[in-house]
Amino acid sequence: MTPIIDAVDLLKRYDQFTAVDGVSFHVNAGECYGFLGPNGAGKTTIIRMIYGFSPVTSGSLRVFGLDLQEQWREIRARIGVCQQHNALDPDLSVEENLLVFAGYFLMDSGEARARTEELLDFFALAGKRNAKVMELSGGLARRLTVARALINRPDLVILDEPTTGLDPQSRHQLWDKLQELRRSGITLLLTTHYMEEASRLCNRLMIIDHGKILVEGSPEELVVQHAGDSVVEVEGVDERLKQFLLREKVRHDITDRRIVIYANNSVSEQIRSRFCTSRCTFRTAGLEDVFLHLTGRELRE
């Protein structure tokens, strides 16, 4: 089966700066594929290339089996894009934002109104149809943004940090809707800084940094491979513990004030019994541990 997205040795340069450096990946039909990475890692640059906003410097990028350079109009007609920042028209009502956007896809008025009603119902926005955008809460505005990205019945929806800034209730409500879209067969491409969001929504994901893919796989696979069963955080830097970790080849990170250890349960028990004379924290490993272990814990500009 032809992948929805097939990228091979994708490169993007801005003068002397390389934003995306030889990235290869594919996205299958009906899955949610995620991009994780620190700010400036290259995530948004890749998705801008996918929907044709930013030209590819070199490499191959095919969407729906079509060449992006030659058939970008056909590709764009089958894509919905939910951008990171609010791009709704503040002078229009909720309903008008959908109707006007439908016009960009040359929908006739009857089809546009039918699709608008369908999306207002799906995202529980019917009661706000006449409200101006500036009257909406953050959660409602994001639901409208996603609804607008779906107006053309796309086969692929690109979601660039769709829940940033939302409260927990609004975030969970939007996750439920995105899961429904995925179950209906729509392919989702997601960038996010929320590890819980990636774990919940993504079938597969990549972690990218400095324009290169560090790892790729399902959230569960990546946790097992790179963080193990559990994480132990030990306050203070104990030299005996450091030597034990090096000798046993246990994955760990050392900061100024603590040691973070990624281990299986048997090693965790050894650490608990032999080295936890001061404060230790034991918890189940998660995707955030994988992310921090691979990309580092230091602050970046």
Image (tube, grey):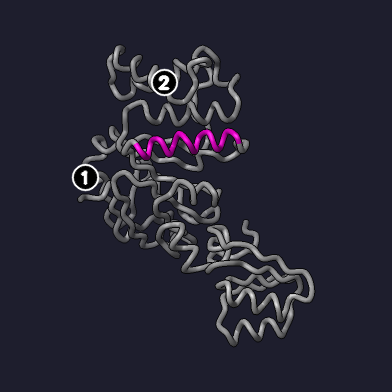
Residue 290 at what x, y percent from top left? Answer: 53, 63
Quick check: can you spot residue 16?
no
Task: Name the amino acid type tagged 2.
Answer: Leu
> Residue 182: within the magenta?
yes
Residue 270 at what x, y percent from top left? Answer: 65, 79
Residue 299 at what x, y percent from top left? Answer: 65, 60
User: What segment is highlighted magenta in the picture?
Assistant: 169-183
Residue found at x 57% / y 33%: 170
Task: Name the amino acid type tagged 1.
Answer: Leu
Secondary structure of residue under mark 1: strand
Residue 217 against residue 129 in the figure, above or below: below
In the foreground, 179 or 62: 179
Residue holding disc 1: 66
The answer to which of marks 1 and 2 sits earlier in the sequence is 1
Label placed on residue 98:
2
Secondary structure of residue under mark 2: helix
> Residue 292: within the magenta?
no
